[in-house]
Image: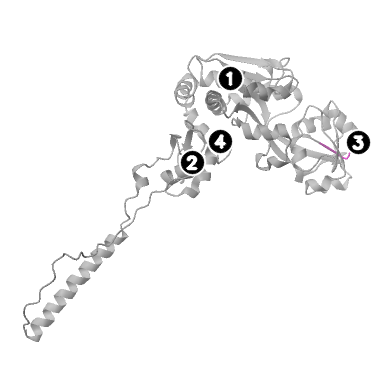
Amino acid sequence: AANFAHSARFRRQPHGNEPAIAHTAQMTLPDSILRTAMRAALANALATLALAAAALLVPAPAAEAQEGIPCGDLYTVAPGDTLHSIAVRAYGDGDNYLTIFEANRGLLPSVRRIEVGDRLLIPCLDGSGPQARSDVLAGGQSGQAAAGTETADAAPGAAPDVEIGLLTGPGFAPFADPALPEGGMATELVRLALERAAPDRSVRIAVAEDWTKHLDLLADGTFHLGFPWYRPDCDRADRLDASMQRRCADFAFSEPLFELEVTYYARADDPMTRANAYDDLHGGRICRPASYFTFDLVQEGLSAPDATLVFPPKAEECFVLLEAGVVDAVTLARGVAESEITRLGLTGKVAEIPALASTQTLHVIAPEQSPEALAFLSLVDAGLAGLKESGRWFEVVSRHLGPFGVSLR
């Protein structure tokens, strides 16, 4: 709970032992002298009242001011801190805690979960200075200068000689697969990010065939970080399966490695193209390639018994089934979909359902209970920020998307 310091003013009351005013004599004075004296007394009284009023307008010194947190810099979370109490000290108003949360989304899984030792950016409310934690970690520098700063600041929970253990898996093109160049887009981005943020650290990348075992291998400390993982809508975790709920509750997410625009398609002459809500697809047959995630479908109520899901091996098969009338809608990444529609000669025959488009993000994850892993996750964030600032991120992503007929716009 947040602790608030209260300051108050007290009006001093006369004590019983203070000397009484003695009235010893009465004197009669001429009216002119009396009036002059009364005017002088009145002027003095008004002046005294003015000074007293001015004093009341001066705010009492608050205890928070003595412990104020400057904005525009990183603050290390101490025992007993909450986002609310930090906002009180930084801004004088605890209601601004969401400003701090938004600036540190890559580190904080929720507004209620901060850890001692976390390095939080305190953004300035007037918009000056950095507004995202990754901006500070990048430091506006490049190469090893930025990396050296980050190693000292963002990995306080890790010994300097600890090897960073990374875990990924196969069959997730273009993001991760040992058969892909550089092991896939996500593998190359994570490796480059850590090389940039911590050039002196040793990094080990392992591939585990069974993705369902990855969370256990991270939780038991066999590996520090896993990638690439989609981040579900954890605010609606009650609509997720047990694995997704665990991901929300027990793991922290990096800044996005990549954002994927996912949309829906129907036959151009089907009224379904005018759907405005996911409920409009209830009772329909929806196709998505077998290698894709399904949590978004579950969250939007597009699973049995409300909808029939079809999972062929390849994206092109979904569009063949759509054209044949076997399924009513196809949902997958926009870039892949547009490439397949063009390749299969379906332009004009298939149309997007624009109201149902969404954005999904890919991340590196770390177990919440491991300070060491969370420190390494901060290094990934710092390195990613540097890659994006330098333009290297764009080059890597474009190179990996090219063979799949997808380009960045």
Q: Amino acid at mark 3?
A: Glu
Q: Nearer the viewer, residue 121 or 401?
A: 121
Residue 327 occupies quadrant: top right
Q: Amino acid at mark 1?
A: Leu
Q: Secondary structure at mark 4?
A: loop
Please indicate whether residue 176 sits to the left or right of residue 34 in the image. Answer: right
Q: Residues within 10 Å of mark 2 (few under 14, many from 20)?
A: many
**Disc 3 + disc 2, Cβ < 8 Å:** no
Please indicate whether residue 308 sits to the left or right of residue 384 in the image. Answer: right
Label 2 sits on residue:
82
**Magenta stretch, residue numbers:** 324-330
Q: Amino acid at mark 4?
A: Leu
Q: Residues within 10 Å of mark 3 (few under 14, many from 20)?
A: some
Label 4 sits on residue:
108
Nearer-N-terminus badge (3/2): 2
Label 3 sits on residue:
323
Nearer-N-terminus badge (1/3): 1
Give the alpha-carbon distance from disc 3 to disc 4, as whole Å.
44 Å
